[in-house]
Image (tube, grey):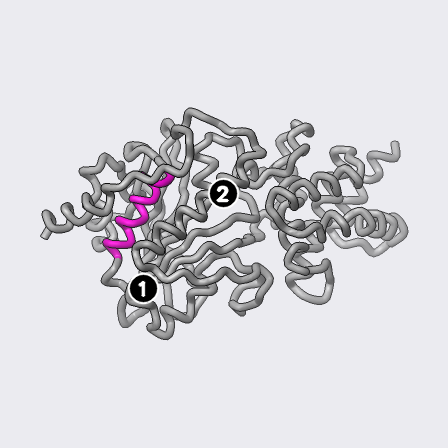
Amino acid sequence: MFNKTKIFIKKMLSRKRKIFNCKFNQNTPSLEMMPEYTRKMIQAFLQYFSEKGYLMIPCVLITSGIDPTVRLIGSHVSPMKNYFIENKIPKNGLIMSQPCIRTHNLKKIFDDSVIPAWGSYFISLGALVMPEKITELCTNSLEYLLNSINIPAENIILRINSADRDLYNLAKKYAYLGIGYDDSTMPEKYYRHKIDIEDIWGRNFNYAIKKGDILYDIGNLIIIENKEGKLGVELALGTSTILKSFFSLSHVNSVNPVFGIEKINNPLQSKFEDAIIASAILFSEGLIPSASDSRGRTLRSYLRAIMYFKNKFKIHTESIAKMMWQFENSQKINHSGSNFIVSYIHKIEKEILLQNNLSKEEKFILIEMKKNFT
């Protein structure tokens, strides 16, 4: 049985399809090129898996509310949930490219001692197959990473938990390719995946890229199951994390850069950049800042963060609008945010100066504003 699997894997990994005209860890393109590299990655992923027979489904708006268990779409699994819940996964599987925002960074956005390694916004490349297709999906994913992205096998590490014998045995089938393994070095929760559905959970191994002695996670292979058995297998790859590691970028935000922000030259600039990126993306979907609904409050918090760093770094509001406008151009989205932000910031700053009953966010902003008065 092992020899048959090995022959199958070798056949699947036989074609070379490099999408970048550069080598792993040797060339760092200008930041202006990064949005185009992201688009190439997405196109190559969808084309490769489509040619294998996977059915491509469209993405949804981050603010769509299609998944009532989350405020904003933070994973491609949200639009895919009904397929495995209702046992309707197509024979050859599903794929999609889904824009996502995860708001964890907002929890510490005003804490200058915390600089998150992750960005709020990213694009998730996802696939979903029936349980019996797990080997084919795993092989397809490795072919994409090895041959399309051109990551050397010795720099790909599968981070597995030996207690999950099915995933452990699957991962070890690829050892002859030169792929490395990180075996059970993390707490058990690292190998468990939350699906946000009662009585359904996931067990996973992680894909990582090795740079020196450091492992950078770039995705997961997840068995979705309940007490009755396996419901499906999900692949999740992050464009930002892959490109950051491939090009040795300083932060994942550099994959979707805000041009001009690098002039700040302050460790906190990544938090400022993150707030601008998330705000622009949410504005592009028609969201407006609001106190009356959860999604609107999220956008309002990102805008408050922009105002906090604007005053901390002594940047003109018009300069922020220009940076946001350039970001919108690079992402090929509308200019809703840059057209709105100047008047919004002026309005809120005036209100903060006049009000007595301020929120925690507004108090942080006021402290920075007062520093500029002295």
Q: Is residue 279 left or right of residue 350?
A: left
Q: Nearer the viewer, residue 365 or 98?
A: 98
Label 2, secondary structure: give it: helix
- Position in image of residue 170 (x %, y %): 22, 50
Magenta segment: does it hold 136? yes
Quarter of the figure with residue 320 = top right
- Density class for disc 1 (Cα within 10 Å; few <14, some 14-19, many ≥20) is many
Residue for point 38% across, 72% down: 85
- Position in image of residue 343 (x %, y %): 83, 50
Q: Which residue is mark 1?
A: 232
Q: Is residue 81 left or right of residue 111?
A: left
Instruction: Give the CA separation, mark 2 to mark 1.
Output: 28 Å
Q: The residue under label 1 is which amino acid type?
A: Gly
Residue for point 66% across, 49% down: 280
Total marks in image: 2
Q: Which residue is mark 2?
A: 38
Residue for point 61% across, 50% down: 107
What segment carries the magenta color? 134-149
Quarter of the figure with residue 175 = top left
Q: Nearer the viewer, residue 130 or 143?
A: 143
